[in-house]
Image (tube, rainbow, N blue to C red):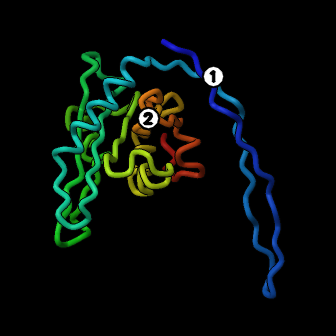
Amino acid sequence: MTTITLPALDSDEALLATGSGMLRVPGYSLGERTIQVDEQIAIELVVAARSAAESAYAPFSRFNVGAAVMMEDDPEERIFCGSNVENSSYGGTVCAERTAIFNASGQQLRRIRLLAVSTPATLNAPLEQRSPCGLCRQVIREFADEDTLVICDSGEDDVIGDIFDIERLLPFGFQFARE
């Protein structure tokens, strides 16, 4: 296990005047956070996500994506993989991250420990071209807790990937109040 520190994020709230009234831009503040990462598991998941991307069915976009997830509540510490599956009816398309999470959920597992995503065609591209889409971020949040981590493969030889906790990946994510 390696201890790393996620940096603090801070932006002030702002009120903006319009001709019809004010608009509020919410502020957001996250403190610096120290976390434990098992780098060997992180590497295993990135490698598994890269491999899963090879199985993608992406005849329209030609953009293969692979994901690999390990669940916190899985005593066997299995790796569940998924790849994107496109459909002529675009609404029928399923992303790799959701495929992996749904595979794990089908085994009655409910808490993501670590999820890795790989996009082989854009490994050296900016983060926004290789990170989970909004829908996947929301699904990740459904199965996340404060200790859940997500790694986006960077493709760099000496970098395992870009790492996020759920609050850094999806600030203001929607959640039902659970009782």
Amino acid under label 2?
Glu
User: Which residue is drawn at the image coordinates 20% and 38% (left, top)?
Assistant: 106
Query: Which residue is most to the top?
Result: 1
- Is residue 103 rendered to the left or right of residue 20? left
Check disc 2: other Cα within 10 Å, few if <14, some if 14-19, many if 20+.
few
Check disc 1: other Cα within 10 Å, few if <14, some if 14-19, many if 20+.
few
Amino acid under label 1?
Thr
User: Which residue is drawn at the image coordinates 43% and 35% (left, top)?
Assistant: 156
The x and y percentages for residue 67 are 30, 40
Above or below, comparing residue 138 to residue 6 in the picture: below
User: Which residue is drawn at the image coordinates 32% and 33% (left, top)?
Assistant: 69
Q: Which residue is mark 1?
A: 34
Above or below, comparing residue 174 to residue 161 in the picture: below
**Secondary-structure class at tag 2:** loop
User: Which residue is drawn at the image coordinates 28% and 19% (left, top)?
Assistant: 77
Q: CA distance from mark 2 to mark 1?
A: 24 Å
- Tag nearer the camera, 2 or 1: 2
Q: Which residue is mark 2?
A: 156
Q: How many marks?
A: 2
Query: Which residue is most to the bottom?
Result: 19
Closer to the camera, 135 or 47?
47
